[in-house]
């Protein structure tokens, strides 16, 4: 299962994200393996929640390397390291919209479903690109605006 979401999460308290993850991720947790983009925001928050609250397999997918990710994301990966099954570094030569979109497509191609947490009111983003690609691939998706 691919998890995608906004990097802008400061507009809600952390407890609300925990409630959302309990509601939308925990039903899948007993049998799912989650692929997470390794960025800040929803990626880091969902990684930490899944690591602390489930036994699910967790794969982190970075467009370049983990060392190139923002500090918040690197800290979350370090904190959850003993729970992470695999880290995939796609080693893009340059981090830009194209490399992030390639990372998102890679995750969708390796999973059977996507759960997206887009920022409410933003209709163009990497999250929406990932959800649209999931739809194009004929795979189910869940949209949870935050």
Image (cartoon, rainbow, N blue to C red):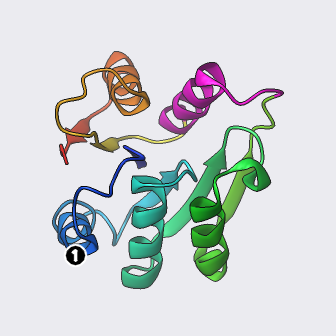
Name the spot of residue 48 as percent of width and height, x first: 46, 73
Residue closer to the observer: 54 or 43: 43
Q: Which residue is mark 1?
A: 15
Would you identify the image quadrant in which residue 26 lies?
Answer: bottom left
Left or right, 66 with reference to 141: right
Residue at x 78%, y 47% (from the top left corner): 65
Q: Is residue 102 above or below residue 25?
A: above
Q: Residue at x 40, y 63 (%)?
A: 46
| Residue at image point 26% right, 40% down | 119
Indicate left or right for 94 with 27 as reference: right
Residue 117 in percent (x, y) is at 28, 45
Residue found 30% across the figure and 22% down from its top: 135
Q: Is residue 99 magenta?
A: yes
Task: Check the image and report above or below for 88 versus 26.
Answer: above
The answer to whether residue 96 is magenta is yes
Which residues are drawn in magenta? 93-109
Q: Secondary structure at mark 1?
A: helix
Count of picture labels: 1
Please name whichever residue, 96 or 2, is drawn nearer the observer in this view of the structure. 96
Main SS of residues in magenta = helix
Splitting the image into 4 quarters, where does residue 97 fall?
A: top right
Check disc 1: other Cα within 10 Å, few if <14, some if 14-19, many if 20+: few
Q: Is residue 32 above or below residue 56?
A: above
Residue 18 place in picture, x, y as percent: 25, 72
Residue 30, image quadrant: bottom left
């Amino acid at each position: 299962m691919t998890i995608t979401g906004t990097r802008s999460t400061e507009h809600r308290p952390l407890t609300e994200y925990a409630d959302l993850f309990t509601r939308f991720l925990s039903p899948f947790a007993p049998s799912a393996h989650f692929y997470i983009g390794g960025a800040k925001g929803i990626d880091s928050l969902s990684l930490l929640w899944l690591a602390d609250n489930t036994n699910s397999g967790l794969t982190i997918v970075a467009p370049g390397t983990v060392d190139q990710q923002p500090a918040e994301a690197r800290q979350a990966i370090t904190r959850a390291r003993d729970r992470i099954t695999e880290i995939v570094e796609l080693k893009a030569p340059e981090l830009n919209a194209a490399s992030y979109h390639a990372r998102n497509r890679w995750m969708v191609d390796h999973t059977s479903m996507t759960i997206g947490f887009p920022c409410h009111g933003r209709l163009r983003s990497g999250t929406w690109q990932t959800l649209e690609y999931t739809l194009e691939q004929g795979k189910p998706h869940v949209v949870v605006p935050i």
